[in-house]
Amino acid sequence: QVRKIPRSIHDISNGDHILGFGAELAEDHPGYHDEEYKKRRSYIGDLAKLHKIGEPIPCLEYTDEEIKIWGDILEKLTQLYPTHACKRYLDTFQLFNFVPDRLPQLQELSEVLMMRTGWQIRPVAGLLHPTDFLNALAFRTFHSTQYIRHGSNPMYTPEPDVCHEILGHIPLLADPEFANVAQVIGMASLGASKEEIWHLTKLYWYTVEFGTVKERDGVKAFGAGLLSSFGELEHMLSGEDGYMPIFEDLDPFKKLPKMNYKDGFQKKYFLCESFSDVASKLTAYARSLQRF
Ligand code: H2B
Ligand code: FE
């Protein structure tokens, strides 16, 4: 079955291809035994499915418990950012004035992005199919979950949640060069074959999710999977958990290693010279696909 190549964000559905956890979650999800949590998560997910492009994203009234999870994560992570996050992240992070006692609304974050780089946020019920997710990047649209992880283990989530999106992804989308990196991956995905989508998913994973960049005072994180995880950030620099990670140059034309979603931290990170360097490498790869 051939998918139509989307011509605008209106051709991409945020609700037709949700993968990962549905309303029932799975046994290994920390919220599996929590009926209240599951109800809340599907309520928020259903709201996302009703959202139409161009409409404001509905504001959610987060509970005190939810705000506490956000606040704990924010306070923990901001201890590491000065030493572990890349310069561009530290700069764009400032634009948002995050505070522990208020969980930001996606709508206000989307407005900041729109003003800075022309990106918009679109709410989504859960993990979106890679084709839809990547295609949307071509139209400067970032699909973001709006529910929060389960409170039993605030430093861990098996799926994207609003803390991962807000602390990991959203600040750097306000950086023009990073915004281009994400969009180039998206553009390469338009009309891509299954194999190409898989390769682009890996390129996304090793840059936007787990990318690192060389700075004058050492290796810094720009990937959202790093910037939203206290443990992973520490591991990246110290290998204190016993495994010193390997750093390698990124070559988008080479076969990339298998992605590690589940068991622990990454063993290898790709190290970039700068955002403009990654963008030009990815652009060269995108051009080589010669689909149009
Ligand atoms: N969906 C959502 N909601 N958030 C993500 O961060 C995400 C996604 N990442 N779908 C995508 C898949 C990524 O893992 C790659 C492109 O498959
Ligand atoms: Fe992510």
Image (cartoon, rainbow, N blue to C red):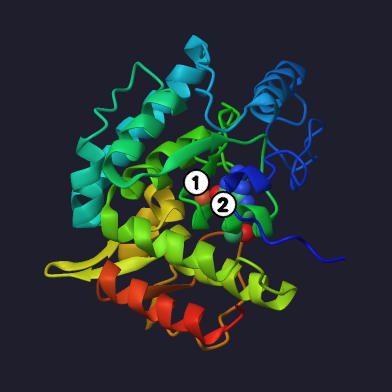
Query: Splitting the image into 4 quarters, where does residue 156 fall?
Result: top right
Tell how many labels: 2
Q: Horizontal placement of 264 versus 89: left or right?
A: right
Marks 2 and 1: CB-CB under 8 Å? yes
Q: Horizontal placement of 148 versus 232: left or right?
A: right
Q: Horizontal placement of 63 versus 248: left or right?
A: right
Q: What's the mark number on residue 141?
A: 1
- Is residue 241 among the parts visible in the rendering? no
Which residue lies at the image location 20% right of the left edge and 37% below the top edge? 94
Identify residue type, mark 2: Ala
- Residue 96: % across, % down: 27, 31
Query: Splitting the image into 4 quarters, where does residue 273 fall?
Result: bottom left
Which residue lies at the image location 78% right of the left edge and 37% below the top edge? 22
At label 1, counting other C-alpha atoms closer than 10 Å, the crowd grade (few under 14, some 14-19, many 20 or more) is many
Whether the residue carrying mark 2 lies under 8 Å from ligand 1 is answered with no
Q: Quadrant of the C terminus?
A: bottom right
- Residue 247: % across, % down: 37, 78
In-front residue for pair 229/176: 176
Which residue lies at the image location 50% right of the left edge and 22% below the top edge? 56
Q: What's the mark number on residue 136?
A: 2
At label 2, counting other C-alpha atoms closer than 10 Å, the crowd grade (few under 14, some 14-19, many 20 or more) is many
Identify residue type, mark 1: Thr
Q: Secondary structure at mark 2?
A: helix
Q: Quadrant of the N terminus?
A: bottom right
Return the residue found at the far right.
1
- Residue 254: % across, % down: 52, 89
Inter-mark Cα distance, 2 to 1: 5 Å
Considering only order in the chain, which callout, 1 or 2, is on the residue closer to the N terminus?
2
- Is residue 95 among the parts visible in the rendering? yes
Return the residue found at the far left.
216
Which residue lies at the image location 39% right of the left edge and 72% below the top edge? 244
In the displayed structure, 37 sits above or below 2; it is: above
